[in-house]
Structure formats: C-alpha cells, structure tokens
Amino acid sequence: MLHFKTIPEDYVRKTVQCAQVALSCTRASHQTAVRGANKPAPQLAALTPKARSFVERSAALCQPDHVHVCDGSEGEASALLHLMQQQGTLKPLTKYENCWLARTDPADVARVESRTFICSEKERDVIPAARLGQKSALGNYIAPPDYEKVVADRFPGCMRGRTMYVIPFSMGPVGSPLSKIGIEITDSPYVVYSMRVMTRIGSKVLEALRQDETFVRCLHSVGTGGVPGWPCDPQRTVILHRPVDNEIISYGSGYGGNSLLGKKCFALRLGSVLARREGWLAEHMLILGITDPKGRKRYIAAAFPSACGKTNLAMMTPSLPGYKVECVGDDIAWMKFDSNGVLRAINPENGFFGVAPGTSADTNPIAMATVFKNTVFTNVAETQDGGVWWEGMGSAPENLTDWKGQPWNANKNTPAAHPNSRFCTPAGQCPIIDGDWESAEGVPISAILLGGRRPAGVPLIVEARDWKHGVFMGASMRSEATAAAEHSGKVVMHDPFAMRPFFGYNFGDYLKHWLSMPQPKRQMPKIFHVNWFRKSDEGKFLWPGFGENSRVLEWVLRRCDGETCHQETPLGFIPKDGELNIKGLGDIDMKQLFSIPQDFWLKEADAIEKYFKEEVGEDLPKEMWDELEILRKNVKHS
Ligand code: OXD
Ligand code: MN
C-alpha cells in the first residue's frame, strides 16, 4: 500500500478539489473549474470512493499542478496530440493519416528487466528455492521495506509543474467476465495516448467500476531528466509490482513495456498471480483463428519470446490454398476453462505494440496494411516525405533521419531504426481481425504452440505426448536473446513459456498451476513445440517460415482431429514421412529440419537439468524431473 503520511492534508484538498484538470492546450473541452471547498470537481465525482482515494493519495504524493481524469473521448485525444507536439514529444508523419513519430531518450529504449521487481512478504513467493537470497534468472524480489523506500526516494513531488492523468482502463472487452480493470496514474501524455490505443479507457470503464469497485492501482511517473520532449530518469528507473495489494508502480521510463502498465505489468505479472488465485492462465501468447478449406475454424494460442515473430504468426497470410488466418491478439492471452470444459481465451489488449524492424510487405503484409493510420511509431527512422522506414522494410530511401534524429549514414553500420522500435496501433483496424476478437466469453482454444529461436538441434515441430510433457516443453524452452530487453548478443537463454521476464510469482508454483489444469470433463488442448529458425551448417534457414508456417498449422489441425499423421521420436511426435505438406516449396532438407542429434540433445538435457537445479531447486514439481529422465532415456536409446 502507498503510505503518504508526510503530505499535508490541505495540499490534497487544494489539488484535488480545486483542480479540475485540464490539458493546458484546450479550452473548450477541459476548462479549469474552481469549485467550492466541499465539492469535488465533477471529474473526480465520477470516480468510485476507492478510485478517488487512490487519486487523492497519489496527488498528495506526486504534487502535480493539475489532475485530469481521462474520458477516452476524441476531443481528449486531439488535445493530447496537440500538447505533445508543443512539448516536442511527437511530430506528425504527414505521409499517413493520423500517424506520429516519437523519439525517446537513447537511454530509454527497452524493457529494463534488471530493475523490474515483485514485492511480497516472503521471498519464496517470488523466487524459487534454489536462488533464495541470490540473483535469480526468473525474477527479482524486493522486500516490502525496500519497496517503500524506492517509492519514497522517487515519488514525492515528482509531478510538480505537470498534469497528473488518471486513466481508468479495462484489460479485455469492457464487461466481459474474463476482463479486469485498472487505473493508471501517469504524468506522461504519451502514455495516456498509447494506453488509449492499447487498452479500453475512459468513461465506460468508470461505469463498469461502479458495478464492481475492484481495480489494479497503477502509478507511473517518467521522472525528471531525459531529453527535450522525452522526460525520463534512466539511472533511477524502477518497475515495482505488489500483487497482494493489486499495485504496480513504475518510475523513470516512458518506454512502452515499462510505462503502459496494462501490458506486461498488469496483464502478465499481476495477471499471472490473479490467474493462479482464480484458476485460469495469463500467458505471453498470441491468439489466432484458422479456417481450413472445409470451412472449419479453430483457434490456436502460441507462446514465443519477445521479438520472435508472434505478430507475424498472429497475422499470417497462409500460403496453403483454402486456409484463412484471423487475428485475435499478438502478445497476451488470458485463458480460462468454461463450464463445458472448453479452454476460452481473450486478448486483454486493444492494440498492437509491435516490433517494427523486420516487418515488410513480404514478412507481414497484414501488419503493413494495419499500421499506416492512427499509429504512434517510436524510434523508427523518418523519410524525407514524412514517412517511416526501418531495417527489413525494403531498400532504404535517400536522406533518412535515424531514430536519434540525425541524418543516417548507411556506411556507418548503425541502424536507422532502433532494433526495438515499435508501432502502437489499434487492433480493430487490422484487416484480418477476428470477428470474435472482442467476444465476452472468449474463443475456444484447440492447440497451444510453444517456441523460440533455436538455430541448432531443435526440429520444426514436435507434439507433446500429453499435457505433462507439454508443460515440460514449456519449462525447458530456450531462445536466442533479442533487442526487446536490455540483453546483448545472440546468446541462447532459457525462457520458460516465454514468460521469463513476466512471472509474477515463483516459477515452480507456476508449473504446478499448469499441471493442475487437466481435470475431469476438461478438453485439454494439444501442446506443440515449434522452431521456425533452425539453420543449416552453412547458416541458412532450413524452413522458409512466414506464410509457409500454415503448412505446420495444417499438421497441427490434423493432429487435433485425431489423424494418425505422426511418428514417435525421443522428443515427442513429429510428422510421419510425407505427412507435412511441402508441395511446391522446392528444396527443403526435411532430414536436417527434423533431425534429433543425440549429442546435442544429451547436452540439452544437461543444460535443462542444470537450469532446473540451479534456478528452481526443490520448488520444481517432481513431474518435471520425471519428464527430464524420460527425455534423457529416450535420447540415449535413439
Ligand atoms: C513486448 C515484449 O513488447 O515482449 O511485447 O517485449
Ligand atoms: Mn511480448
């Protein structure tokens, strides 16, 4: 809980009762109204008592000049855009409709995992037994007194001279039984505008709050420092989560993953805790619908680490004739078994915060058809005619301005767009958005894919023998590091369930939660591990990927239908010879693509054992040790 004991009461009254707040640039829609001492400003009167108390305490702590409760209207959005242009945060991209370019401080470009903490009374609530008191690869723990201190060192008075925005937001369609509500308080108009894209915000959420007062408290400040137009405090950035109090506090960064608190902080870290408590799953997964040539539609959820192609798969244009893919979400899935035993998923988000580099008319034509209106681009390169460019989009136009605002010199070997540059775009304008993407009950999931970037040793697709084996596949996932966080180099990292940066609680308990899912009368989705990224000894990709991945999905669907198009291997089931449709693909080295090198897999089993022992220890469910032994035995006898 936030304690604001040192802030004088009359300050709260002054700020909150008298400062009906205003986007300083608009007069018409947001006039400052000075009210009588006992009357709350109308905006604050719209808040439920708990929400109001959160706002009042935050105002007392941060001491903003104004408080503005966001209504989510178009007028408010235009006022924010106007303000951000004045402040130098955004510039219009005149080539497109309602598109904007933001350049961050070069020190504020990615999620900061090393400064992201989960707070709980007991360290073991957060960190598996093997790493208690030490650095853990599966999350950072912060004790309650340290948490309080971090807040006390950063927040008092941090919004002086600024407006404090109050954003009521819903993760998931407003009113769905699977959705949850949060209130983010921030001093960043960029965050407000982006939250408006990425979540559902405003009056309709306040209305829903009146039915059920529960919400997650999210407090964010960009802090002081940074460059003109992009205030931030990279040296002192910190992202805190306190699940027991439904609280998230973030300081010092405006970058999406650290500041749009509905996304990673709420939907995954706090979400995973809520999901465990309430018996559902909050996962780092895309959701797609796929219709086969017979017109049967199924939904698939898929977990890949950041920047491994989730958006591409979610918006895939299938190369196989007669197939159609539709997108429900590209990053996060909240899934719950319904009363008929069907696993139902919603995308809690309302937009795509996608990695721009690598997105092109070849790799993701649907994303290209989505992002050139109503979008905020961050840290991409700018073309002379008011457009954008990034590596992988096609050949570079003349006279580019790079992501730092400098003329780009192709010979200098620095990227024009930052590798983690992003588009933030409304999901509803995706041309293949699924008809049921906002369905209150969620879409039924038939299969779950897990995967990562594995240049060596790991076959294109392997089906888990059963749920337990699938959980082991998730627990032992590894992938090459990408630019989405502050890691460097191409090191292959363990990233269980693609959730490594996003666990809200002890990973051993997370696995137990997954293992508890099968119950009588539940229809368990099949689980598969995929790897689009295997390379030949010469360093060439063995599989074309992108739209051709529909061939792999076709096999997945056939397996879901119970076809015996599989064969057993030491790792699980792979397509029987001739059963993966590669017609028309030319030269595909299926032998290498599906080979299971014994020495590689014995080493992999050792690496998994080391990881389990050193990172999890006695919190690892016994079932995982059993599965590891099965793997090792199978590989030895292969
Ligand atoms: C993301 C990430 O932004 O995973 O989705 O980093
Ligand atoms: Mn992600």
Image (cartoon, rainbow, N blue to C red):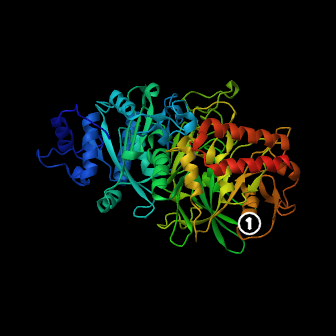
Q: Amino acid at mark 1?
A: Arg
Give neighbour class at mark 1: few <14, some 14-19, many 20+ (Cα, 10 Å).
some
Residue 253 drawn at (x, y percent): 45, 34
Residue 421 drawn at (x, y percent): 57, 38
- Image-based side of 550 in relation to 154, left or right: right
Q: Quadrant of residue 65?
A: top left
- Image-based side of 76 in relation to 278, left or right: left
Q: Secondary structure at mark 1?
A: helix
* Residue closer to the observer: 483 or 613: 613
The correct choice, above or below, for 226 with respect to 43 in the image is: above
* Residue drawn at (58%, 55%) of the image: 514
* Residue closer to the observer: 577 or 192: 577
Quick check: can you spot residue 29?
Answer: no
The correct choice, above or below, for 316 with respect to 491 in the image is: below
Residue 203 drawn at (x, y percent): 32, 57
Quick check: can you spot residue 244?
Answer: yes
Split into quadrants, the picture shows ligand 1 in the one at top right
Q: Which residue is mark 1?
A: 559
* Residue closer to the observer: 405 or 104: 104
